[in-house]
Image (spheres, grey):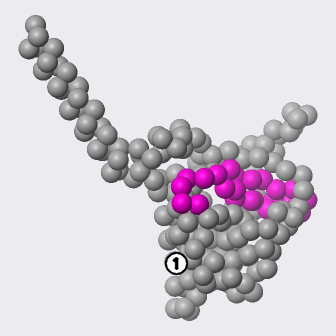
Amino acid sequence: MKKVLSIISLCLIAVLAVAIIVFSTVNTNYNLNLTKPDYIEISINNSNTKESYYSNGDDEHKQVYNKVMELYNASYKQKIMSGIFSGVLFNKPTIIYSTSSVNSILNNGSFIVFNYNNEQTLTLNGKPYTYTSSSGSQTTNIKYNKLYVQVKNSNSITTFNIYVKNIDNDYSYYRYSVQAKQADLYSYIQENFN
């Protein structure tokens, strides 16, 4: 009987050790999987760079576009074990509606402006987002052509916002609340655009 219990205990310890090793080495991706923008702009304290960086632009602009998008996408990758301990693993992105101008938000901080040549539909977890007001009315098929991605200096997973400018209303916006580790992206923007 002791021998059986010892074997079962060793097997459980081995399974636990394998799980810890796997969770410590395997990455997961918390990216919202937004449509790739046609071009980007960098805004620091509401001062646009006055340059647009296109995905199909000349070599220099295309290189900047690709680097920013690479760092943006990499900021969502996290080891599963880190996600468990930071509480991110089970957090889902949320969308919050606000009745003020998105321009008031841009005065402080660093942002990447995602620009789209065609209208996009606001989605959450892969499905079109439906906003229900306090009166019960619903708004569906919310259209946008710009996103303002907040960039923070964070060495660990932290909450940041992506502001969605509603095409139909300049005095309201939707805000994705998401989590990522943006230290590399923040450093690149500060070093090259500040």
Q: Which residue is mark 1?
A: 66
Q: Position of residue 37 (x, y in %)?
A: 62, 71
Picture quarter containing residue 47? bottom right
Could you say which is closer to the camera, residue 34 or residue 160? 160
Q: Residue at x 57, y 77 (%)?
A: 188
Picture quarter containing residue 114? bottom right
Q: Residue at x 23, y 29 (%)?
A: 13
Could you say which is closer to the camera, residue 61 or residue 193? 193
Q: Position of residue 122 (x, y in %)?
A: 70, 54
Residue ranking furthest to the top: 1
Q: Residue at x 53, y 69 (%)?
A: 184
Q: Which residues are magenta?
A: 154-177
Q: Position of residue 69 (x, y in %)?
A: 54, 71
Q: Residue at x 30, y 44 (%)?
A: 22
Q: Amino acid at mark 1?
A: Asn
Q: Is residue 137 visible?
A: yes
Q: Quadrant of the C terminus?
A: bottom right
Say above or below: 154 vs 93. below
